[in-house]
Image (spheres, rainbow, N blue to C red):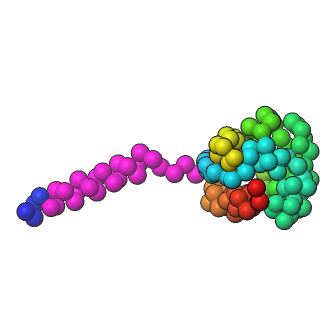
Amino acid sequence: MGRLKTFALAALAIASLAAAKAAPEDPSAVHQEVDIPLPAARIYAALLDAKQFARITGSPAKIDGSAGGAFSLFGGAIGGRNVELVPDSMVVQAWRDNDWAPGVYSMVRFKLTPQGSSTHLVLDQTGFPKGEFHSLTVGWPAHYWTPLKSLPR
């Protein structure tokens, strides 16, 4: 019985290692999905309208909500340009933390999918500096998802 138990534990350990290697965390990309109890049009507007963004986040914002338009968020801590806009559906931005080296931008894509009166939001961010993964992974929920979820319908 001791050999069988040892074999079973070894098999379980090997399976766990294989599973961990099969789905590694990619520190060069952030992927988050969140359901927000607001219509897609309201989220889209909040991402592209300075007054709404500032009201939701409690921080100063300047946003030119057109394709190619510049934005400055959280009192200038974040900046960039809108690259592609699909009304009520998608926002793609060249996005940077102003602490990053000059000229370093990441690409951020917000995909909005209506689900009844709510929206399924998928965020993908790539091209950020090495070592920023954890900060970004924590920052999106804290600075975007939680404030959006707290808005009244």
- Is 26 left or right of 119, judged from the image as shown? left
| Residue occupying image coordinates x 89% and y 38% | 66
**Which quadrant holds residue 93?**
top right
Membership of 126 in magenta stretch: no
In the image shown, does 116 or 93 lie closer to the viewer?
116
Question: Where residue 81 sits in the image (x, y, percent)?
Answer: 85, 43
Question: Where residue 103 sits in the image (x, y, percent)?
Answer: 82, 47
Count all numbered tags in the image, as a single digit: 0
Residue situated furthest left in the rendering:
1
| Residue occupying image coordinates x 35% and y 48% | 18
| Residue occupying image coordinates x 16% and y 61% | 6
Membership of 17 in magenta stretch: yes
In the image shown, does 112 or 106 lie closer to the viewer?
112
| Residue occupying image coordinates x 84% and y 55% | 53
Question: Where residue 149 sits in the image (x, y, percent)?
Answer: 71, 59
- Is 8 left or right of 122, judged from the image as shown? left
Residue 13 appears in the picture as rendered? yes
- Is 11 left or right of 117, judged from the image as shown? left
Q: Main secondary structure of the magenta part?
A: helix
Quadrant (top left, top right, bottom left, bottom right) of the C terminus: bottom right
**Which quadrant holds residue 85?**
top right
Start-end of magenta stretch: 5-28
Residue 126 appears in the picture as rendered? no
Quadrant (top left, top right, bottom left, bottom right) of the N terminus: bottom left
In the image shown, does 100 or 62 lie closer to the viewer?
62
